[in-house]
Image: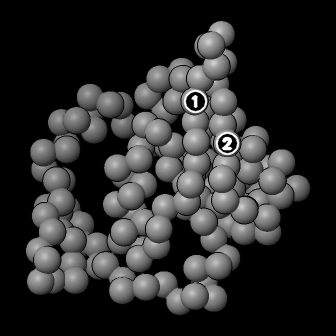
Amino acid sequence: APELIVLASSTTPVEVAENLVDTLPTLDPESSMVTTRHMYFYRTPQIQDRMANKFVIFAGPSSSELGNDVAHLLGLNINRLQVGKYADGETEVQVQDSVRGKHVYVINTTTSADSIMELLLLISAFRRASAKTITAA
């Protein structure tokens, strides 16, 4: 069975919003570094092909911008994922890329009941698709 790791934050959305102003990233196109007031992130030109084939990154619909930023910093493309609703209000999740035997990283917020349900359905879909490990953040 795949290993499941869930990273949770103890900060509330209000605390995150208050700190957001202090941590907005600045990006200099000439530089290879993304800076915030608290941290420095170095952009990599490309992760080695043999490493890139071993893991995939997915972003839930509530965190698509963050997922794109993380993928950009790693020099990867975000993988394809479709989340929708049926007419009766049920949530539908479709993973459109192969995850068999790969390390899966899911970026999704948990600010509402719907986003938590989307995250749980994504984890279930990845487990059924034979992902080696699943890390949700």
Picture coordinates of residue 1 (x, y %)? Answer: 88, 56
- The numbered mark, 1 or 2, whose residue comes first in the sequence reads 1
Q: Residues within 10 Å of mark 1 (few under 14, many from 20)?
A: few
Where 46 falls versus 119 (above or below)?
below
**Which residue corresponds to the image point at 66% horizontal and 53% vertical from the top-left?**
96
**Which residue corresponds to the image point at 43% horizontal and 85% vertical from the top-left?**
46
Residue 116 visible from this viewpoint: no
Is residue 113 toward the left or the right of residue 97 in the image? left
Mark 1: secondary structure:
strand
Is residue 101 toward the left or the right of residue 32 in the image? right
Q: Which residue is mark 1?
A: 84
Mark 2: secondary structure:
strand
What's the colour scheme? one colour
- Location of residue 104 by image quarter: bottom right
**Which residue corresponds to the image point at 35% horizontal and 71% vertical from the top-left?**
73
Q: Which residue is mark 2?
A: 94
Picture coordinates of residue 97 (x, y %)? Answer: 67, 59
Q: Amino acid at mark 1?
A: Gly
**Which residue corresponds to the image point at 36% horizontal and 69% vertical from the top-left?**
72
Residue 38: assigned label:
none
Q: CA distance from mark 1 to mark 2?
A: 9 Å
Is residue 16 toward the left or the right of residue 132 in the image? left
The answer to the question of whether label 1 and label 2 lie on touching residues, with beta carbons closer than 8 A, is yes
Where 58 falls versus 44 (above or below)?
above
Q: Amino acid at mark 2?
A: Gln
